[in-house]
Image: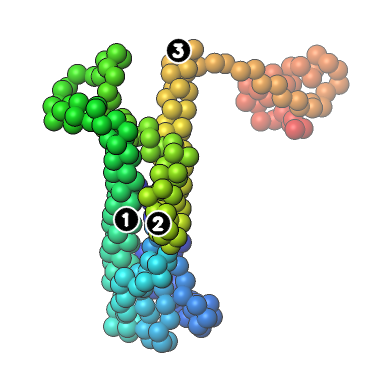
Amino acid sequence: MGRTFHYIQNDDVLKSFVEFKDSVLRDRAVVIARHGDYSLFLKYISDDELGLELKNTEKQTIIQDRSYKIGETSAELVSRGTRHACQKMAELSDGDVNRRRLRIWKWHVMDWQKANADRAKDLLEREEKWSDEEITPDEEIVDIETFLHGEYLNLGSTIALIEKHLAGDEVNLERLKKFAINDIMEMTSEDTKDRSLAEAEKARLKDGMKKHTYQFTVSVEATDKEHARQALLSYLAGDERIKVQR
């Protein structure tokens, strides 16, 4: 799932309208937050009225639109309305992700079934059963989740699949390809990050905390080398009377 990017915090929406209503907002709406294909905009309606517009920027359609009279509202009420709009935006975006991802997964399964008609029955029978035991290495047929995870994350394979099933539908073809690329890149980056963190923690536990040697250069005013050494030791011991040039 994606995440919501906030450009104006909920509690600052009313304050931002008052601050920008005579400048930026006169020319264009300002983005409050984004999530996937959706954006929440702060609009100028009049000097005494602000608007919150939830829009699907990919399809250029308005999903939700409401306004607040400045003299009849408060920062808390506008903040609450902004928060609800952001929640709605996240739900819509996550729903879009699930639908698009499921459509591609279904195509992967359909193509696999066509290419492995003799094994399709075994796969379905396996899915009808449930076991708490892990998959053994010698099993030939993997479960659907493992299959889809591997197939879907193969970007070249998934893009070829989309082009095959949406041949002739240029609008939806480009839209779904763009979605798949962003979705797979996000999923694989999370996988890579999780693996890196796990490997780093494993190495830390195995090797223990490593000590490093650090060298610092300082200048101490003294009449001779021994005097300088004693002054430095006193300084390191916390004697604030010793002046050290860094």
Residue 184, percent from left and from top: 43, 42
> Disc 1 and disc 2: Cα gap in Å?
9 Å
Q: Secondary structure at mark 3?
A: helix
Q: Give the distance between the C-alpha atoms of the residues marked 2 and 3, in whole angstroms.
A: 41 Å
Frontmost residue, 114 versus 36: 114
Q: Nearer the viewer, residue 108 or 131?
A: 108
Q: Is residue 215 left or right of residue 198?
A: right
Q: Are discs 1 and 2 less than 8 Å apart at CB?
A: yes
Mark 1 crowd level (few <14, some 14–19, many ≥20, 10 Å Cα): some
Q: Which residue is mark 3?
A: 206
Element marked by disc 1: helix
Give the image location of residue 188, x and y in percent. Answer: 44, 37
The residue indicated by pointer 2 is: 36
Percent coordinates x, y for residue 149 in the rendering: 35, 34
Amino acid type of the residue tagged 2 in the rendering: Gly
Q: Residue at coordinates 80% horizontally, 14% vertically from top-left?
A: 226
- Look at mark 1 in the image and give the residue it sits on: 96
Residue 56 sits above or below residue 177 on the image = below
Question: Where residue 11 appears, x then y in whole percent?
Answer: 37, 65
